[in-house]
Amino acid sequence: MNIGELINVRLSDDGNAVVIIDQTLLPNEEKYLTLTTPEQMYEAIYMLRVRGAPAIGIFAAYALYVLAGQIDTGDFAVFAAKVNEYSAYLNSTRPTAVNLQTQLRRLTDTVNALSDLPIHQIIEAMRIEAEKIYDEDVQMCSAISRHGLSLIRGGVGNAGKGGLRCDDSTLCESFGVMTVCNAGPLATSKYGTALGPIILGHEQGMKIHAYICETRPLLQGARLTAYELDRAGVECTLICDNMASAVMSQGKINAVFAGCDRIAANGDVANKIGTSSLAILAKHYGIPFYVFGPSTTIDLSCPSGADIEIELRRPEEIKKLHFSKPMAPARVKCYNPAFDVTPRELITAIITEKGVLTGTATAL
Ligand code: MRU
C-alpha cells in the first residue's frame, strides 16, 4: 500500500527532535514541524497537529525519548522523576484515546526497569522502545487492513433496507463505505485502520466508493480523509454529517467503517463525535457497522463506555475556526465534545490485528 512519501510522525535524523506533518494545515499545505520543547509537543497534540489515537501514542513515545535526552543529570532518581513529570504533562493533553497513556507508560516502565544502568543507556533503551511502538503499529495496521478487506470482498449487495436504488450503474456495482473522521495513514504509523481496507481494496482493483462524512467541527473527514483517499485514487464523495441518513436511505452504503479511540471491556467504543449517530442510522437501515482499531486501543481496565472520559474542547472550534467570520453569536454557549460512545450492541464487529471479532473486548 503506497499513498506517497508522506510520513506523519518520525524522529529527526539526529534523534534530537520529533518531526510531524502539521495536520491542521492539510489539505492546503504540506508543512513539516520540528519539535524539541515540551511546550511545542504539548501544543502539537492539543491542537491536533498530530492526531488519531495510534499516532498520538507513537508521537508521545518519541517525544518522551527526545525530552529525556535533554535532562542534564547522572542521578537516576532525578532523571526518573523528570521523565515522569514530562510524561504526565504530555498525557494531560487529551483524555479519551487510551493509546496516549499506554505508550507513555511503556516508556516510563522501561526507565523504571533499568535503574541500574547509566542514564545514556536508559535513554537508548527508550529510543528502542519508541521505535518498537512504531513498528508494532505498522504491523497491526497492515493486518487490520487485510482482515477488513475480507468484509468488502464478501459484502457487495448488502446495501440496507432501501437496496441499491441509484441510477448510475457504475456506482451501483461498487462497494459503498461510509467513513467518519480520519482513521487513515495520517492517524496511525502507516496504512491506517478504518481506511486501510479501502485503500488496499482499491489497490487490488476492487471498486469501492467512499462516502466521507466531513466531521464537524474540526473537519477531519473533509480535510484529511478526502485528502488521503483522493491521493490514493479511491473514488470518494464528501457529504455533510447531517446527510448520512439520506445517503444511507438511497441504498448507496454497504457498510460503515469507523476507527476508535478507546474500546471498553464490554465492547463499547469511543470514537469521534457523531460516530454513535452513524451506528444508530446504520442499524435503522440494516447496514453493518464495523469498528477498526489495534489492540493498543483496548482498555480492559475500563468496564464500559460510561467510564470513558470524553474530551471537551473550545467553543471557538464550533463558532469560528473554519469560517472567515464567526458563524454564531459571540455569547451563545457551545457544547463541544470531541468523542462519543457507541454501545456494543450497535457494532456488527470489531476488527483488530487478530481478526474480525464479535463479542466483548475481553474476548478480543
Ligand atoms: O480528534 P481526533 O482527530 O484525534 O479523533 C480521531 C478519531 O476519532 C479516530 O477515528 C481515531 O483516533 C482512530 S485513528 C486510527
Image: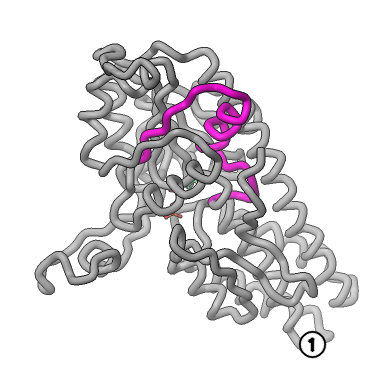
Quadrant housing residue 357: top right
Res. 301 visible in picture: no
Q: Nearer the viewer, residue 186 or 51?
A: 186
Res. 33 visible in picture: yes
Q: Nearer the viewer, residue 19 or 237?
A: 237
In the rendered structure, the answer to whether residue 297 lies left or right of residue 235 reads: right
Neighbor class of circle 1 (other Cα within 10 Å; few <14, some 14-19, many 20+) is: few
Is label 1's Cβ within 8 Å of ligand 1?
no
Residue sitting at 45 percent across and 51 percent down?
Answer: 224
Q: Which residues are magenta?
A: 187-212
In the rendered structure, the answer to whether residue 106 lies left or right of residue 320 reads: right
Query: Vertically, is 350 above or below 124?
Result: above
Secondary structure category for the residue under label 1? loop
Query: Vertically, is 66 above or below 261?
Result: below
Asked if the magenta segment contains residue 189, the reply would be yes
Query: Vertically, is 67 above or below 242?
Result: below
Type of residue at label 1?
Answer: Thr
Instruction: Find disc 1 in the rendering and name its residue.
Output: 73
In the rendered structure, the answer to whether residue 111 lies left or right of residue 212 reads: right
Q: Tell me which colouring the rendered structure shows.
A: one colour
Where is residue 314 shown, x and y percent of the image? 29, 68
Asked if the magenta segment contains residue 18, the reply would be no
Residue sitting at 12 percent across and 73 percent down?
Answer: 330
Quarter the N terminus occupies: top right
Where is residue 263 shown, x and y percent of the image? 48, 40
Where is residue 31 shown, x and y percent of the image? 55, 69
Query: What number of labels is visible?
Result: 1
Residue sitting at 29 percent across and 56 percent down?
Answer: 217
Where is residue 77 shown, x and y percent of the image? 76, 79
